[in-house]
Image: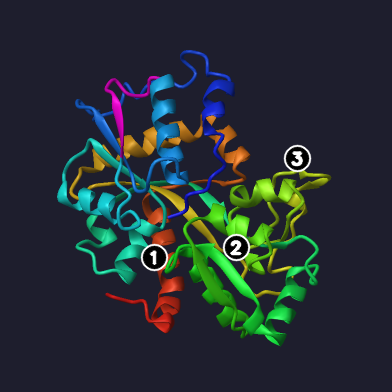
Amino acid sequence: MRNAFVRRTSRLFLGCTLVAAGVLPALASAAWQPDKNVEIVVAGGPGGGTDQLGRLIQSIITTHKFLDVNTIVLNKGGGNGAEAFLDLKMNKGDPEKLVIGTNNIYLLPLVSKLGYQWQELTPVAAVAEDDFILWSYKDAPWKDAKGFYEAVKADPSNLRMGGSQSKDVDQTLTLLLNQTNNSKLVYIPFKSGSEAATQLAGKHIAANVNNPSESISQWRGDQVEPLCVFSKERMSYTEKVAGDKSWADVPTCHEQGLGIDQYRFPRTVFMPGEVTAEQRAFYVELMRKVTETPEFKAYVKQNALVPTFLEGEPLTAYIEKDTARVTPVFKEAGWLKN
């Protein structure tokens, strides 16, 4: 799905302080452990955000010797990740295969005729979440999100919202905004969040809903402005990012009266279906240890992600709630296939 995490991940591998031996021990006491190499299948192309996350996880596992076997990263990004998810379904019972994805693993079957449902797979964990920000170009006639939507309602034909791809999270959020605010903002799909950021900086569109890391360069370059973040609370990062402003200075969209209290998507890890409870529990603990390392925490901070760890019933409830929220949007847009 999204392909524009800040491309500086490799420097994290070199710059983070390694944990002293014994602080984060390998999972030696687990009831079950893999005895073959573990495949980490990335539901996205090389270089994108999902790919960077998958390779970060692999690097951390190797550096800290969390496994006694090797890990192999494979990219299967065809069909917005459907290639990876179908691979999981076809390898049911295989405990040495993981897929790194987003909410696409459970939402894609709603909008495309695919040969699987997420319930046929095994959720392991959500290891982080992405916030969404309403961005506009520098020196726009509106100064905040409320002013932007007043302009949208006054003249929707001349204002466009850009985003990454169609029938995806950006367009879904745009439709939610239209429903909530009784507006008719037109959505223009681009190949990536990076392209949407460039189009906004050039004033070819009025706004986008990029993740923080997708537009940070343009913000620092004084080309775009964050109007609000789709979160219940302001972001926690107080370090200055652009001039004297930090992520924590960005108001919430709810503060600005847009009516959407929160909109995020998770970074997920899944296994095939029909694995044992012990096998799933092993990878839950593995992912928990990965997220506790300095390297992972630095990655989350650098990309302004939301520190999150969900597994078991809380993760299932998250998936079901997210699905229930967007299904009416998909139905009204005519996207539903199942």
In the rendered image, the quadrant that contains the N terminus is bottom left
Residue depicted at x 27% and y 35% = 39
Residue depicted at x 29% and y 41% = 98
Q: Which mark is residue 239?
A: 3
Q: Which mark is residue 209?
A: 2
Quadrant of the rendered image containing residue 163 = bottom right
**272 or 200, which is in the foreground?**
200
Q: Is residue 57 depicted above or below 325 in this figure?
A: above
Total numbered labels: 3
Q: CA distance from mark 1 to mark 2?
A: 24 Å
> Disc 3 vs disc 1: Cβ atoms closer than 8 Å?
no
Residue type, label 3: Glu
Color theme of the render: rainbow
Q: In the rendered structure, which segment of residues is drawn in magenta?
A: 64-74
Residue type, label 1: Glu
Residue type, label 2: Val
Left or right: residue 69 versus residue 143 is left
Q: Is residue 195 depicted above or below 207 in this figure?
A: above
Please name which of the two marks, 1 or 2, marks the residue nearer to the observer: 2
Q: Which mark is residue 320?
A: 1
Mark 2 lies on a secondary structure that is: loop
Mark 3 lies on a secondary structure that is: loop
Residue depicted at x 30% and y 28% = 71
Mark 1 lies on a secondary structure that is: helix
